[in-house]
Amino acid sequence: MPRVLLVHYTTPPVVGGVERVLARHARLLAGEGFEAHVVTGRGGPVGPGVRLHRLPCIDSRNRRVLAVTRELEAGRVTPAFHGLVAQIREDLRRLLAGADICIVHNALVLHKNLALTAALHQLAPQSSIRFVAWCHDLAWTNPQDRSHLHPGAPWSLLRTAIPGVTYVAVSTDGRRELAALLGVPKAQIEIVPNGVDPAAFLRLAPTGRWLAAALRLWEQQVVLLLPVRITRRKQIEYALHVVAELVRRELAVRLLITGPPGAHTPGNREYLDELRGLRHRLGLDAQVVFCADLPGPRGRRLRLSDRTMADLYLLADALILPSRREGFGLPLLEAALARLPAWTSDLPPLREVGGDAIHTFDLADPPAAVALRLIHTLMEERGYRLRRRVLASYTWEGIMRERIIPLLTRLVGVARP
């Protein structure tokens, strides 16, 4: 697989958005089989499978770099600057040997270490390696940064496109700014947004992570949670008919029924068989999940711990509880803490717990009407729409698969001009 170097002033635990993005890129590339190397001035390892190289003189806060930066801010380009450029250039040249791609985060458009910028401008045009300038921030378009810049070199390098280098912006507006700054067509600049790892951000436990991946929950439009044991008074078949109506409207849906058959009534296993049959007749074998039927991440029967149940609340978009009878309605308390909207049958105990903060329906209502109300209510909620937008377009896994790997594969397969 290609060898990829990722270059930035610092890496975590130094705090910063670019540091987090670079670390995520490196880990994902390593996970995809790339030979990932990180070159940094300060910071620690970014993850397993990623080799770390420290070059103190590319750190923006290195003592020698700070001394040169003070001279540059005064408008003086001194021998100390040129000496630093030469050292960084040769140090990078050594590390670049054998690399296929070098991804430089911010250093070609930001003034935090202009000696590094100058060294890269000297290396990139004469190298067979494919260089990528990943541009998060632009010094020349930021009024706060522009006050530190002067006419001419080396400051002008921050607005000079290097022939053969691929430029990447993280947003459409960023591409517009970068194209205007460099004087190149917008079409020549790639857009690769930043992302999020939802499982890591939500701190899902291993079983929760496995369920999210195995059931493709991130890809759904609606995930409904029915956290009950399988007993007839829970009227689970009503929820299946609601899901059938959502699917009929071409929505990607999962209904998660968490519990096994209730332990104290022999007929509950027969009820589960009836529900399985109904699921099949409605064409919902993929959409309706009886968690008690799942084999679990290691092949053993899945057992849902309290931690995994909490994860399922975080993974769901709404709670549905179509019971004929309830003594209290404990799932409403849990849904409330997970900020999950609740759809329940209109029962006094559930109204007592949920008040006017729950969505109720009568079991005599057609499931199609409930499905329509449910999806319309969700679609009016900006939090739901934002969540689904992010999961559809801004997960690191999706960005790596759909944007980054195709870009790098294309670059490796194209000869330098």
Image (cartoon, rainbow, N blue to C red):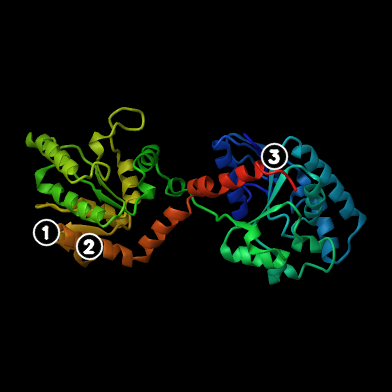
Q: Nearer the viewer, residue 389 or 354?
A: 389
Residue 277 in the figure: left or right of residue 404: left
- Residue 103, given in percent of the width and then of the height, sits at 67, 47
Q: CA distance from mark 1 to mark 3?
A: 65 Å
Which residue: 22% across, 62% down? Answer: 372
Q: Nearer the N terminus, badge 1 or badge 3?
A: 3
Quarter of the image containing the N terminus? top right
In the figure, 362 relative to 36: above or below? below
Write down the quadrant of residue 367 in the picture: bottom left
Residue beneath disc 2? 372
Residue beneath disc 3? 100
Dot 2 alpha-carbon crowd within 10 angstroms: few under 14, some 14 to 19, many 20 or more: some
SS at circle 2: helix
Write down the quadrant of residue 274 in the picture: top left
Q: Nearer the N terminus, badge 3 or badge 2?
A: 3
Which residue: 21% across, 40% down? Answer: 259
Q: Nearer the N terminus, badge 1 or badge 2?
A: 1
Which residue: 10% across, 57% down? Answer: 363
Residue beneath disc 1? 347
Q: Tell me, for residue 75, which label it has, or none.
A: none
